[in-house]
Amino acid sequence: MQLTWLGHSCVLLTGSKKVLIDPFINSGSVAGTDPDIVAVTHGHADHLGEAVALNRKTVAITEIARYLKAKGLPAESMNIGGTIVVDGVSFTMTAAMHSSSIEEAGPGYSAGSPAGFVIGMDGVKIYHAGDTALFSDMKLIGDLYHPDIALLPIGGRFTMGTAEAMMAANFIGAKTVIPIHYNTWERIAADPVPFKKAIERTTDIKVQILKPGESIQTGS
Ligand code: NI
Ligand code: MN
């Protein structure tokens, strides 16, 4: 499987299927990624992003799925704690400590609760934390699902910063951590290098700092 960080929280997994998580980038469009499946962690515009325009099979919490269905999308609804398999790709929805809303004029839609995902494809498990504070049940995500890679927000202000993400990485225990949700804007500026050095000095976890658009290969 190939994992590409497109920027902010947007990650493309390319294996037997193409899965696009949180289809928002700060400039340009993710339309060219041509995903089979889109997964949305919560309703904020920097995560829901281009989900409606992409018009693909979209995995989201019940309330966001209802919104997407109203827009004509083939949405797959689920909720925190559940697992579904879509076209051979497994999606487990995990808790996130954050807020959620759909920012759109007109009749309001509830966005439900914010979430994260553990996504399993081609024998590799990826944990995308969504937007979240540190919470100790991340230990359960590690113990139950044993993700190979954890995508963790480090930008602070709206999510964990690097100090909290260090503890999150320890709780989750994935061999590889990739920082996300930072340096998109000044208000979530963060330096991933001291974060990487501190984790790699004190644990066996590797921190992979990617540039927007950069990929890594993982698994077979
Ligand atoms: Ni958010
Ligand atoms: Mn966000």
Image (cartoon, rainbow, N blue to C red):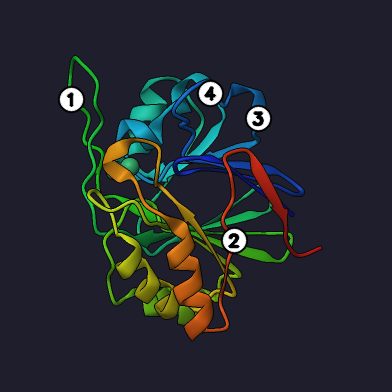
> Which quadrant is the C terminus positioned in?
bottom right
Per the model, the C-alpha gap separating discs 1 and 2 is: 39 Å
Query: Sequence-wise, which precedes: disc 2 or disc 3?
Result: 3
Query: Sequence-wise, which precedes: disc 1 or disc 3?
Result: 3
| Residue, far right | 220
Residue 91 percent coordinates (x, y)? 53, 56
> Which quadrant is the N terminus positioned in?
bottom right
Name the residue: 35% across, 53% down. Answer: 115
Which three-letter amino acid code belongs to the residue tagged 1? Gly
Name the residue: 26% across, 31% down. Answer: 102
Name the residue: 59% across, 75% down. Answer: 175
Which three-letter amino acid code belongs to the residue tagged 4? Asn
Which of the two residues, 208 or 92, is positioned nearer the viewer here?
208
Per the model, the C-alpha gap separating discs 4 and 2 is: 31 Å
Q: Dot 4, crowdedness within 10 Å: few (<14), some or many (≥20)?
A: some
Q: Which mark is residue 108?
A: 1
Which three-letter amino acid code belongs to the residue tagged 3? Thr
Q: Which mark is residue 208?
A: 2
Residue 23 percent coordinates (x, y)? 49, 34
Q: Element under label 1?
A: loop
Q: Is residue 175 left or right of residue 181?
A: right
Which of the two residues, 100 or 64, is positioned nearer the viewer here?
100
Q: Which mark is residue 33?
A: 3
Which of the two residues, 180 or 67, is positioned nearer the viewer here?
180
Q: Is residue 209 visible?
A: yes
Per the model, the C-alpha gap separating discs 1 and 3 is: 30 Å
Per the model, the C-alpha gap separating discs 4 and 3 is: 13 Å
Query: Sequence-wise, which precedes: disc 4 or disc 3?
Result: 3
Q: Which mark is residue 55?
A: 4
